[in-house]
Amino acid sequence: MLYLALLHHPVLDKNGQIVTTAVTNMDIHDIARSARTYGVRRFFVVTPVRALRALSEKILEHWETGYGSTYNTTRRDALALVSVEPDLDGALVAIERDAGRQPVIVVTSARPGGERVSFASLRARLHGDAPHLLLFGTGWGLAPDVIARADLFLEPITGPSDYNHLSVRAAAAIVLDRLSGTR
Amino acid sequence: MLYLALLHHPVLDKNGQIVTTAVTNMDIHDIARSARTYGVRRFFVVTPVRALRALSEKILEHWETGYGSTYNTTRRDALALVSVEPDLDGALVAIERDAGRQPVIVVTSARPGGERVSFASLRARLHGDAPHLLLFGTGWGLAPDVIARADLFLEPITGPSDYNHLSVRAAAAIVLDRLSGTR
């Protein structure tokens, strides 16, 4: 059972400072569609900013029960996976309620280094009973404190070039595709 | 040699009508980053709307030589791959100039049906000398006329579910990752 979370805090900016990024509509929609495609159980949008949580809830409501629910049903189906939480602990509690146990926390980063688990190895683990929570960071990636808290650190996506600046939307899509192994 | 184009016309809307979609900043940035990661030679943003081409050029200029070029260099590196063209023929001419011959046209669609080439087979073809142009449609996908014009029709991305409504940004990222075979 795979859960996914997109953290807007604590994440890094381009200078390595810890910041809180804004929640963007496009992140929620894109990653929800990818999550729905690959059978993710729940997608948590995590932000400590109360006003942004309220805004996100309002957008979700529009698509779930408002005008949007009949206007675009594929969007509704994807957004039904989304929950908004104030912090990582909120997501962990929600998962424990849903799955009956705490998930294995898996962090991602485009940067090399650290002891990493391969896509193949994580794919094999996902066939087991333990729920897993896959964390993505906005901005320039997850803060060191979040990475330190993880049980597993997924290997970075590498292409044929040395350029490693995918958008988080593209990275989440590729990671889910690699983990599904349906190619 | 792989080229990529994102068509904003002729594409389908949700009712199957042929429309022209708006160019979005996010599409250009996301797909340019994915293209840069996977060694795509050039990414064509195709729209018949003169005002949108002018706007796109202005955005590109900001990042290539304006303030953005020093503010965010990874974005500049990705956007350096982008050209704006009024139609598919414009992209074909540009490719012929660059590669010395017309490319093999490869279309994509989330829908099943038709005679499709597999990811593995296309990946093998890309090792040859012929340039290939991979076409993605905005909206609800490429119009039948564009699909009819193609040399190859790539198989759809399928996950473990029957949901096939990825964003074009996510779909382009996954297709490039599958074709690179670097996993």
Image: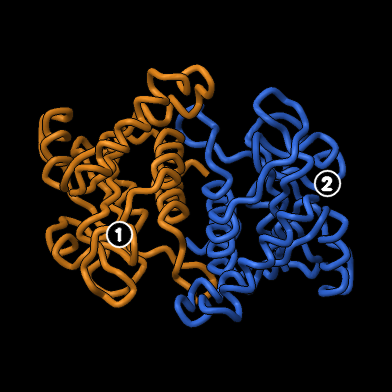
Chain colours: A blue, B orange
Vertical comparison of B139 with B31: above or below = below
Please tell me which residue lies in front, B70 or B130: B70
Query: B24 or A5, which lies in front?
Result: B24
Q: Amino acid at mark 2?
A: Ala
Q: Residues within 10 Å of mark 1 (few under 14, many from 20)?
A: many
How many numbered circles are shown?
2
Q: Which residue is mark 2?
A: A150
Where's residue A37, x and y in %? 53, 68
Res A92 label: none
* Label 2–label 1 contact, CB within 8 A: no
Name the residue at 77% across, 43% down: A9
Decide if residue A28 is on the left or right side of residue B66: right
The quadrant of the rendering that contains the N terminus of chain B is top left
Q: Residues within 10 Å of mark 2 (few under 14, many from 20)?
A: some
Chain ID for label 1? B
Q: Chain of mark 2?
A: A
Q: Amino acid at mark 1?
A: Thr
Q: Is residue A91 left or right of residue B138?
A: right
- Return the residue at label 1: B108
Q: Pick the residue in front: B22 or B81.
A: B22
Up/down of A111 relative to A119, above or below: above
Residue drawn at x 27%, y 75% is B113
* Residue A36 at x, y percent in the picture: 57, 69
* Residue at the (69%, 44%) spot, across then down: A137
